[in-house]
């Protein structure tokens, strides 16, 4: 007798990392509607995510960049170090033009805006599960244009910041003190001060007041 279950393909196991419970629930319900996908777990921060992913071994992890603790870019690197086979897709409200290349360098296979339609999010997941890179057509054309050397692309000075400097810049824009940033990132006060000085140099800012003002303005403009 043939087991009918043998004729069905195995469901792809999906793990969600997002600091908003309502987002995790909504995304989970969307995924659960797909016959070949199932949510095997979720987490709100990096520490919880790494612990659960090691046990649950999902096929794909959906990661937001802003988490309760830690940062999505660093988490991507940690997940890849822990499991080279797992696929990673970033779903975030942050500016794709600024972060898409960074998430790819960190080890993710795609970037999709949270403002995208449910169908687009599912399609992005399927593309990544197939082992393909997913980016919006605008971002894909931008990267292709850069690779082929066609045209001149304006460079936002913020793009000159390293991933860690960008994390610090974001936190400054949200009003966190140097001590608070050090605590959240697990770094020393002196290290954060060094990052602040490098950011000021790269952005041609004269003092801490200008740094705070520009960081706050950038956060407001980006809707973060």
Image: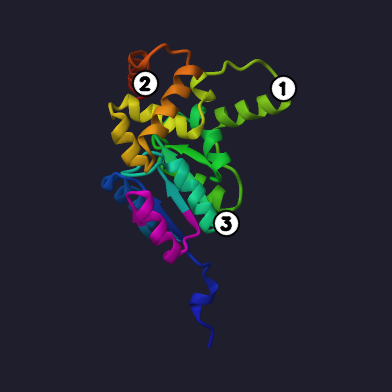
Residue 48 inside the magenta-drawn segment: yes
**From what the image shows, is residue 73 above or below residue 153?**
below
Q: CA distance from mark 1 to mark 2?
A: 31 Å
The C terminus - image quarter = top left
Part of the protein shown in magenta: 42-60
Looking at the image, is mark 3 or mark 1 earlier in the sequence?
3
- Distance, label 3 to label 1, CA atoms, is 32 Å
Where residue 120 appears, x then y in whole percent? Answer: 47, 41
Q: Earlier in the sequence, mark 1 or mark 2?
A: 1
Taking the image as drawn, is residue 122 in sight? Answer: no
Question: Circle 3 is placed at which residue position?
Answer: 84
Residue found at x 42% / y 66%: 55
**Seen in the image, is 25 located left or right of residue 99?**
left
Q: Is residue 70 visible?
A: yes
Residue 151 image offset from top left, x and y in percent: 67, 16
Residue at the spot of label 1: 149
As drawn, the label of residue 215 is 2
Q: Residues within 10 Å of mark 1 (few under 14, many from 20)?
A: few
- Quadrant location of residue 134? top right
In screen coordinates, is 180 left or right of 123?
left
């Amino acid at each position: 007798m043939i087991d009918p279950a043998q004729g069905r393909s195995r469901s792809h196991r999906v793990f969600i990392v997002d600091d908003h419970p309502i987002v995790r629930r909504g995304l989970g319900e969307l995924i659960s509607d797909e016959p070949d996908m199932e949510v095997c777990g979720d987490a709100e921060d990096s520490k919880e995510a790494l612990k659960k992913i090691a046990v649950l071994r999902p096929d794909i992890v959906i990661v937001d960049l802003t988490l309760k603790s830690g940062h999505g870019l660093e988490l991507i690197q940690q997940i890849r170090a822990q499991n080279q086979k797992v696929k990673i897709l970033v779903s975030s409200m942050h500016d794709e033009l600024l972060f898409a290349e960074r998430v790819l360098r960190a080890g993710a296979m795609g970037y999709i805006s949270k403002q995208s339609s449910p169908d687009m999010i599912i399609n992005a997941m399927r593309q990544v599960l197939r082992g393909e890179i997913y980016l919006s057509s605008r971002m894909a054309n931008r990267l292709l244009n850069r690779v082929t050397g066609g045209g001149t692309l304006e460079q936002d000075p913020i793009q000159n910041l390293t991933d860690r400097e960008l994390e610090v810049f974001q936190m400054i824009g949200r009003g966190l003190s140097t001590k608070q940033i050090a605590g959240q990132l697990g770094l020393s006060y002196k290290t954060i001060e060094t990052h602040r000085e490098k950011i000021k140099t790269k952005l041609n800012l004269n003092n801490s007041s200008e740094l705070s003002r520009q960081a706050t303005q950038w956060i407001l403009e980006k809707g973060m």
